[in-house]
Amino acid sequence: MSTFTFNPENEEKFTALLTRYPEKSSLMLPSLWMIQYQEGWISPESMRFLAEKLACSPMDVYAVASFYSMFNLKPVGKYHIQLCKTLSCMLRGSQQMQAHIQNKLGIKPGETTKDGKFTFSLVECLGSCGTAPCMSYNDDYVENLTIEKLDELIDGAQS
Amino acid sequence: MIVKIVSKNFDIPNSHRLDVAREHGRYKSLNSLFSRKPDDITVAVEKSGLRGKGGGGALTGEKWRLIPNPCDKPTYLIINADESEPGTFKDRQIIEFDPHLLIEGIICSSYAINAHHAYIYIRGEYVFWAKRLQEAIDEAYAAGILGESVLDSQYPLHVTLHRGAGAYICGEKTALLESLEGKRGHPRLKPKGKEPEWFFGNPAVVNNVETIASVPFIVNEGYEAYRAYGTEKSPGTMLFGISGHVEKPGVYELPYGVKMVDVIEHVCGGVLGGKKLKAIIPGGSSCQIFRADEITDITLDYESVKEHGSALGTGGMIVMDESVSIPQAMKNLFEFYHHESCGQCTPCREGTGWVDQILRKIIAGNGTHDDLKTILDACDMLNGKTICVFAPSVAFIAQSYLEKFREEFEALLD
């Protein structure tokens, strides 16, 4: 038995989603999202829980969870900065943004600050090429990113 | 130059809300839709010459005809909103500013192929856009536009929004279907002949957001009205996204057949800071690159861009000025492709990383002439030996960068 369970709201959502797909295996991604929003990451316990729900093996869940880059298989900071590094953003200055974030937070891509507040990741194309450079800050996009916007966000979160 | 068919309501305040959308003509096609035969809709789309706007440019009507008729299994319409091709950011404009146009298109298209459930697969990063679309879907359900009887027509139609979770390859339609079924996004082997797509063994059509958003105009105004724009073989309009070094990057709806140089000069305000143009990627990063001196005669339609050795793809153009190092740009893209290879086929999984490593070595000043040859050998391994077109595209783009900007690579070798 797994120690993880959905909260009542997610349990209700899961039940409602069962009627929306021909087979329940389709609930894999929606369920992983629910777990991540509930816990902040996808723990081995939560994968065991989901495996029971979907009548598959925990390894099947892990195989899927580990394929998609947005699923956090370890805990991340309270604020997750994901800077787009792909071509259009590079052409419009993403490397300067990266240097600024690294200096300001004292961490490299893939790392979390010691106080657990910020995680910094470099990601591939966010589909915001016309308003480059772009990053996502938890669930929100910050487009036409500048040093000033970065300072405002990071300083605001730190105060 | 700009034409507004799909983007007609984009500038109207609150255009995403149902009341405003209806005031401005959305769902008008439903007044007559259900009194017409489903086949009428397919015929109109066939005659319009509507082509898929997600990159492939396949004829939409032909895709719809692949659904068996009659069919003893449920049929599904699946909307590809996994917009992930670098340089492409057009579908999000439709979702942000006119989500009801997409839903209207889904209703018309589902009726044509007799689907009673449509899924919209949206990339995971588009959280804002997923929320906006879900709100529009909820509004449509509440108004009786979706549900067990669409506007009292007795035609049931449900729409479910499904979020991806960060995987470029899920924009490939069979990988998308695998993902929608709850698996890793691994593309499927292609069938020998023409077949529909399959969702849990049921026939399905996968269409891009912009393609489906073009359908209501054809249903309302007729195929001739659509064909009044564009060229004979590429009729209609496309949302072109221009990014990189231009004064006014953004998404512009243009008829097919306009000149590429005019778009850069007149629509986008020219190269940023008045610098010299060096290179253009015409249709998303998976299309071969053009040198500035090659684009004079290119018009933005599938045929012209192909004739000049690349592809119109998603219409996402990336413009590079004279300051750009092409080997750096190529390395940037190979990091992308290496990261995004789904890993199913060895040549792709290993080859993309291999080329990335060689480029790193060349850029660091440690390259040799043999390295350029090795990259071309790797391209040979990438092309034609994998399940999907990811690897061949990567091979073609690598060849085009090396061929067209060879002197820049060689300058790093000495």
Image: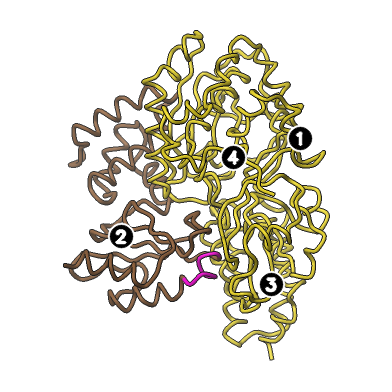
Give the residue drawn at x 51%, y 45%: B93
Quarter residue A135 falls in: bottom left
Residue labelled with disc 3: B277
Q: CA distance from mark 1 to mark 2?
A: 48 Å
Mark 1 = which residue? B228
Q: Is residue B311 visible?
A: yes
User: To which residue does mark 4 refer?
Assistant: B173
The CA distance from mark 3 to mark 1 is 32 Å
Magenta span dominant secondary structure: helix
Above or below B366: residue B212:
above
Disc 1 secondary structure class: loop
Q: Amino acid at mark 4?
A: Lys
Q: Quick check: B238 left or right of B243? A: right
Which residue in the structure is indicated by mark 2?
A: A80
**Residue stretch in magenta:** A88-93
From the image, state the color of chain B.
yellow
Q: What whole-number distance in Å separates the C-alpha atoms at marks 4 and 1? A: 30 Å
Chain letter, disc 3 residue: B
Chain ID at mark 1: B
